[in-house]
């Protein structure tokens, strides 16, 4: 079941691609200095790693790691919480809002 929805490493799904376009608009507007898809890989433990969807540097120099989700699997939520405890970055989960909710992005900080 899970394998059907998986893409190759470095390939964005539709929600990630839409969020990448949003980040590019923020970069052009001067709010984001730099961003990279799957640009950082964090070690959480022996043979356990977490690769956030986007590494984002704001223009004020703050480094953020953004995880784009349509819905959460339990293991993904655990990994982002562990990473937030171990590393000095802002960890932000991004969820696309439906048209009924007004569109845009919902944010959850860890």
Image: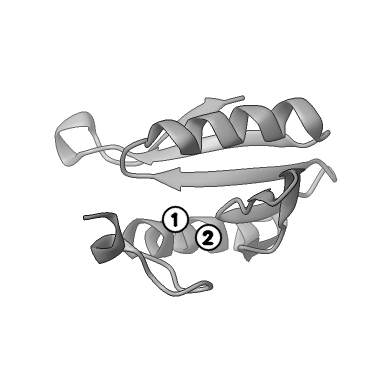
Residue extending furthest toward the front:
46
Q: Is residue 98 left or right of residue 55?
A: left
- Residue 2's disc number: none
The residue nearer to you, when weighing 48 against 18, is 48
Which quarter of the image is occupied by the C terminus?
top right
Q: Are marks 2 and 1 in contact (CB under 8 Å)?
A: no
x, y percentage for residue 51? 62, 54
Give the residue pinned by disc 1: 19
| Foreground pick, 10 / 34 | 10
Whole-percent x, y for residue 55 in the image: 68, 54
Q: Residue at x 38, y 39 (%)?
A: 95
Residue at (49% x, 31% y) in the render: 77
Q: Is residue 20 above or below residue 32?
A: below
- Which dot marks residue 25? 2
| Visible residue check, residue 57 | no
Task: Using residue 7 as the reference point, say whether residue 98 is left or right of it.
Answer: left
- Say what secondary structure mark 2 lies in: helix
Left or right side of 24 for 86: right
For image coordinates 24% across by 34% down, the residue present is 102
In the picture as drawn, the residue positioned furthest to the left comes out as 100
Q: How many marks?
A: 2
Q: For the residue carrying disc 1, how many other residues have a C-alpha within 10 Å: few (<14), some (14-19), or many (20+)?
A: many
Q: Is residue 79 above or below residue 31?
A: above
Q: Is any atom of residue 35 visible in this view?
A: yes
Which mark is nearer the camera, 2 or 1? 1
Indicate the secondary structure of the residue bearing disc 1: helix
Residue 60: which quarter of the image?
top right
Q: Specify the quadrant of the image occupied by residue 17.
A: bottom left
Q: Earlier in the sequence, mark 2 or mark 1?
A: 1
Residue 54 location in percent, x, y? 60, 55
Residue at point 79%, 31% (across, down): 86
């Amino acid at each position: 079941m899970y394998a059907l929805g998986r893409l190759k490493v470095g390939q964005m799904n539709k929600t990630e691609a839409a969020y990448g376009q949003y980040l590019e608009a923020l970069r052009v507007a001067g709010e984001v200095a730099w961003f990279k898809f799957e640009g950082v890989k964090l070690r959480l433990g022996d043979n356990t790693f977490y690769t956030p969807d986007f590494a984002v540097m704001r223009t004020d120099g703050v480094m953020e790691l953004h995880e784009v989700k349509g819905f959460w699997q339990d293991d993904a939520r655990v990994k982002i919480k562990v990473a937030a405890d171990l590393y000095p970055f802002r960890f932000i989960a991004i969820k696309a809002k439906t048209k009924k909710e007004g569109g845009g992005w919902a944010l959850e900080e860890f």
